[in-house]
Image (cartoon, rainbow, N blue to C red):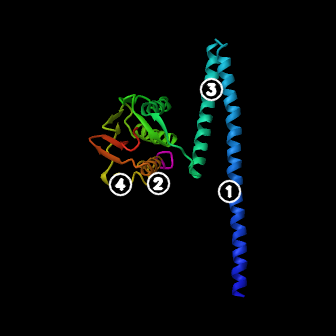
Amino acid sequence: MILLAVGLYYILSNSIIDSLLKSDDIMEKTVKQTLHEINTPVATILMNTKMIQKNISDEKTLKRLYRIEESCNDLLNLYEQMEYSLKQQIDIVENVEFLLDESILRSIKKFDDIKGDIVINNSVNTSIILKTDQNGFQRVIDNLLSNAIKYNYKDGKVDISLYNNWLCITNDGDEIDTKNLFKIFDEHYQLDKNSNGFGLGLNIVKEFCDKNKIEIKIKSEFNKTTIKLDLHNIVV
C-alpha cells in the first residue's frame, strides 16, 4: 500500500509539475506576443503623427499632435519596461556598452515637467562608457533623480557629478535621521508616509547595485543628502 501510494504520488506530482511548466511556457509566449502586438500599432501611430506634423502649421493642431506623440512615447517606454521585466524573469538580460551621460540626460528630460523651480546641475563627462544592463541602470538613475526632486526644497537644486568613477547625486532638503539611513533601501519603506507610491524605488536601486557589485554610500547632513555609486566594476 505504501509503495502504491508513493508511486501514485510520484505520477500525480510529475503530471501537476508538467502542467504548471506548460502553463508558464504558454503564459510567457502569450505575454511576448501581446507585447509585440502593442508595440506595432503604437509605433505606427507615432510614425504617422510625425508625418502629419510636417504639413501642419496651425499651432493648436501641432500642440494636439505633440500630445499624441508624447503619449505614444510613454506607451513605447511602458512596452520597453514590460519587455525588460519579462527578460529579467527568465534571466536573459544582456550587458551592453552605453554612455553614462546619455542615461543621465535621458532621466533629466523625463522629470523636466515636474521638477518645478528645482535646478538640476549635471557635470558628468561625456566620454564615460559603462557596460551593464542598460535598462536596469536607467531605472536606477530615474529612481535616484526622482527622490532627489521629491524630497527637495521647492527652489532647491540637484547636483550630479562623477569623481574617480563614483557617481554622486546630491539634493537640497531636510536631513535624513541617522536611524532611517539604514532603512531607506528596505522594500516598501518610505521616508514620508503621506507621499504617493509604494516605497519600491530605492529597493530597486539596491537590488541592481548588489547584483552588479556597485557599492552604495549615503550621507545626509547640513540640509543636503548625497547618494554615491561606485561604478568601477561597470566602467569600460
Check the image and report above or below for 15 versus 167.
below
Name the residue type under label 1: Asp
Distance CA(mark 2)–CA(mark 1): 27 Å
Q: Which residue is mark 3?
A: 69
Q: Which residue is mark 1?
A: 24
The local secondary structure at tag 3 comes to helix
Tag 1 or tag 3, which sits nearer the N-term?
1
Distance CA(mark 1)–CA(mark 4): 37 Å
Tag 2 or tag 3, which sits nearer the N-term?
3
Name the residue type under label 2: Glu
Which label number is shown at residue 187? Answer: 2
Tag 4 or tag 1, which sits nearer the N-term?
1
Tag 1 or tag 2, which sits nearer the N-term?
1
Nearest the viewer among 30 and 111 is: 30
Can I make out residue 172 in this image? Answer: no
In magenta, the rendered stretch is 194-200
The local secondary structure at tag 1 comes to helix
Q: Are marks 1 and 4 in contact (CB under 8 Å)?
A: no
The crowd level at tag 3 (other Cα within 10 Å; few <14, some 14-19, many 20+) is many
Distance CA(mark 3)–CA(mark 2): 34 Å
Q: Main secondary structure of the magenta part?
A: loop
